[in-house]
Image (cartoon, rainbow, N blue to C red):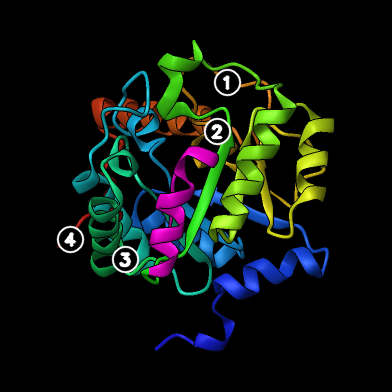
Amino acid sequence: MANQSNRMTVPKFMKMKTDKKKITMLTAYDYTMASMLDDAGVDSILVGDSMAMVVQGHDTTLPVTLDEMIYHAEMVGRAVKRALTIVDLPFPTNHLGVHKTIEMAGRVLKETGCQSVKLEGGAEQADVIQALVSAGIPVMAHVGLRPQSVHTMGGYKVQRNEEVLLEDAQSAESAGAYGIVLECIPNDLAKKVSEALTIPTIGIGAGPHCDGQVLVVNDLLGMPSDYVPRFVKQFANLKTVIHDAASEYIDEVRDGTFPAKEHSFK
């Protein structure tokens, strides 16, 4: 059994802000990747609905279903021994009423072994956040650019309305959220929001002043689609590595050099 004293928990996660320790978060969608990220020491792993785009090949996050999220989150939950695990509630889960959302979020925790859920929204989702927290389900909120609202927002655009962003973030905190993702927000505004809250802020395209950062692991590793967001830093180029390895394999099979003697049984 894993040493539970080393496990990141919601209270430990929140205390990192108090201790002024930067928080690291990455997405994962399967057992192997989650195991490697956990072993590397990342503080938290998000099973993001970004899966719809980077795993399933959709243009938005909207098509992914709750059952699909649970399927992938169960793999992640089984792999992770130390990091805090978070699962996105897919569209339109948190818009179906408080009781239905509790039922669905409860399924996530019961069936995956993950520790919390994330939902998009702030002020308009305060009653849902409060109900989930009251039911014993830790909630991370998500404001700024909200990919599930891409159609109403008119695309993937930087969000600059200070009044709305502060209201959303403070409403989520008041409702009981233990943390909040700030997506695609100007640096100075993300700093202002972070300083206004006692809960940690996790930035993605929100500059260096958030309490932590999150990236989609495919972007981090250089396995992107044709579009790479401006806020992404590719820490590796696995797209080229994988392409070259597969090409070398194809060549060796075709010219008969693989499998060689050392790869064969007598």
78 sits left or right of 205 in the view: left
- Residue type, numbered disc 4: Phe
Q: Quadrant of the N terminus?
A: bottom left
**Kind of residue at disc 3:** Leu
Do the residues under discs 2 and 1 have CB atoms within 8 angstroms? yes
Please say whether residue 132 is one of the residues in the magenta stretch.
Answer: yes
Q: Distance between the residues labelled 4 and 2?
A: 40 Å
Callouts 3 and 1 close, C-beta under 8 Å? no
Q: Mark 4 points at which residue?
A: 265
Query: Which residue corresponds to the image point at 41% horizontal and 29% vertical from the top-left?
Result: 148
C-alpha distance separating marks 2 and 3: 27 Å
Q: Are marks 2 and 3 in contact (CB under 8 Å)?
A: no
Q: What residue type is labelled 1?
A: Val
> Mark 3 = which residue?
109
Of labels 4 and 2, earlier in sequence is: 2
Q: Compute the Cα span from label 3 to label 1.
A: 32 Å
Q: Residues within 10 Å of mark 4 (few under 14, many from 20)?
A: few
Q: Which residue is drawn at 25% across and 69% down?
A: 110
* Residue 217 in view in this figure: yes
What's the residue at 76%, 37% (across, down)? Answer: 190
Name the quadrant containing residue 262: bottom left
- Name the residue nearer the viewer: 14 or 68: 14
Report the Cα–Cα distance between label 4 and label 1.
Answer: 45 Å
- Which residue position holds label 2? 219
Task: Give the magenta-colored segment's residue range.
Answer: 115-134
Under tag 1, what secondary structure?
A: loop
Residue 221, located in which quarter of the rendered image? top right
Query: Which residue corresponds to mark 1?
Result: 228
What percent of the width, then of the height, locates residue 256? Answer: 25, 32
- Viewer-side residue, 215 vs 115: 115
Q: Earlier in the sequence, mark 4 or mark 3?
A: 3
Residue drawn at point x = 52 percent, y = 35 percent: 238
